[in-house]
Image (cartoon, rainbow, N blue to C red):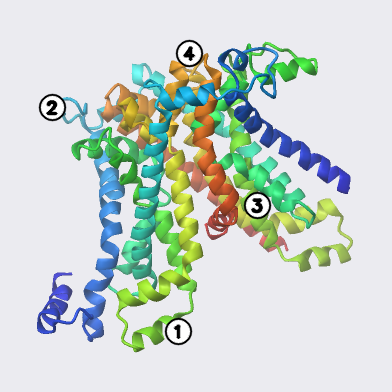
Amino acid sequence: MKAFRYGVLTFLALVFVSPLVFMVTTSFKSRTESGQTPPSLVPDNPTLAAYQQVLNAADTPVFRWFLNSMVAATLNSLLVVTTAALAAYALARMEFRGRNVVFGLIVATLFVPPVILVIPSFEIVGRLFWLDTLTAIIVPTAANAFGVFFLRQFFIGLPKEVEESASLDGANQWQVFWKIVLPLSRPALATLALLAFLTNWNDFLWPVYVLFSPENQTLQAGLSTLQYANAVRYNLLMTGAVVASVPVLLLYVFAQRFIIEGVSRSGIKG
Amino acid sequence: MATTTSTPAVDRAASPSPAPSRSPRGRAGWVPWLFLAPYLLLFGGFVLLPIGLGLWISLHSWDFTLPGKPFVGLDNYKELLTPGTGQFERFWNAMQATGLFTAVSVPLLIVIPLAVALVMNQKFRGRNLFRALFFAPYVLGVAVVGVMWRFLLDRNIGVVNYLADLVGLPDKTPWLTSIPEAWIALVGVTVWWTLGFNAVIFLAGLQDVSPDLYEAAKVDGAGAWSRFRHVTIPGLRPVLGFVVMITIIASANMFGQSYIMTRGGPGQETRTAIYYIVDTGLSQRQMGDAAAASWILTVVLMLTSALVFAATRERGKKKGAAA
């Protein structure tokens, strides 16, 4: 039974990991070797040629795309966490007229399929002159209803007494939020920040359509243009894919607990 | 709101201190809205406004590059719902592709992750490592997954056909350019990519099922299958309903896999509804048609979700009554 379980799991692990390993080894092959059959798992003559090309060539500005993605995902994640935390605190701890309506509206949009937003959002972003800019990638998707919902649940679960004693000591609501609630909420904030970063980094459809210039692409959108321009330069394609994967895989290795917990919690709460 | 904001404004003018008014009512008046304002600005501008604007656009012949956007009433909807028009053919072909993909991928994305979660739901060495490995593809973007698998599935130089040859299977399978191979490839890659996500949710759900129930069932002489049927499945029902729902929505929104791996081909066979909507609205600039199509897709999706929700709840009730 035990051996059977390890057998099944190891087989599955191979299925999951070997494509990624092959992607990485291909990125270290020459152009010819990357397209040859039978394929070699380990490069015969490992080379950094594809990486050099990707760094230098004007028609494949992968490094520029990397910076674009990094800037967009970081700023988007900050915007998501800031706006969601402020809103969630008001909804969790303050009494005011209209609170249930606001919260109800936000939760209702959790069930609206995002496809409904694509066409009109394009129109709005066009009117704001944000087309073909990173602002279009950073701002519109920051209206994250899940973030508000998730942080509100977390804030409600915090012990109220600490906040109450602080406000008895004369702290105003901003001070209570900033000095007491936020430090207590670091795990939840980190989880939301990570999920927002990953989502933005991996977003595909929206950047493909709102970014036009080669130098303004994010990595994911750029990768698809790279593919149609260079369908035969597989080493180059796999290098692009590696560059797009390394940051998220690193984040995943170091923050796996937050990511997996965030996901499993979203399931249970939903 | 106008009346509640006036009180603290007076208070603020009276005292130079930035501390909020001591009156609880005044304090409750505007502070919450200050906290909410940044989010509501985004929410209003990029969620509520687009929902309304989308409906408005769908009633017009709307090309964002042209100044004139004539009102056409329900014509866009009529065109999409009347057999024989060009849009009708393209739209329903795409809806069919989405339906097929959803119908094939959702059962696989429930059964396989559930099986994986059951195997993982015991304490053994290396469990967290395996869980991390299975989940790993999910953190990659669809562009990475698509580009990588398109290479692996290449008819001539792909590793998949090479491995197939090694074990004596056909070695020239056109995974991306023929039907049904292209569907098998798209579904298979999607399962590879998102299996871990569903498995993690199932695993968390399984860990919430009380071990006492299993013990009690064992004492009553229930075998493994019986324990699965009568303890695991009922205990997992809420999570199961949730996973079914989000998987249906995710599959019905499939776009990137087709866009990258098959370009909607061969022909337009694997062009999904979302693909049709963005292509019609943003590449061909017929935003009115595209907006109408996205409303139709949304209604279909919401009806499906409602049906699934009703089905899982109904069966849950019956189970509850029988127990």
Q: Are marks 4 and 2 on the same chain?
A: yes
User: Residues under labels 3 and 1: Cα distance?
Assistant: 35 Å
The residue to which callout 3 is attached is B202
* Element type where label 4 sits in the image: loop
Task: Find residue A31 and report its image quarter.
Answer: top right
Q: Nearer the viewer, residue A154 or B53?
A: A154
Camera-nearest label, 3 or 2: 3
Relative image position of residue A240 (x, y in whole percent):
49, 28
> Which residue is the site of mark 2?
B68
Question: Are labels 4 and 1 on one chain?
Answer: no
Earlier-in-chain disc, 3 versus 2: 2
Q: Earlier in the sequence, mark 4 or mark 3?
A: 3
Q: Which residue is mark 1?
A: A161
Say what amino acid the circle numbered 1 marks. Answer: Glu
Distance in Å between CA atoms under marks 2 and 1: 60 Å
Dot 3 falls on a residue whose secondary structure is helix
Which residue is located at x 38 percent, y 32 percent?
Answer: A64
Identify whether A188 is placed above or below B290.
below
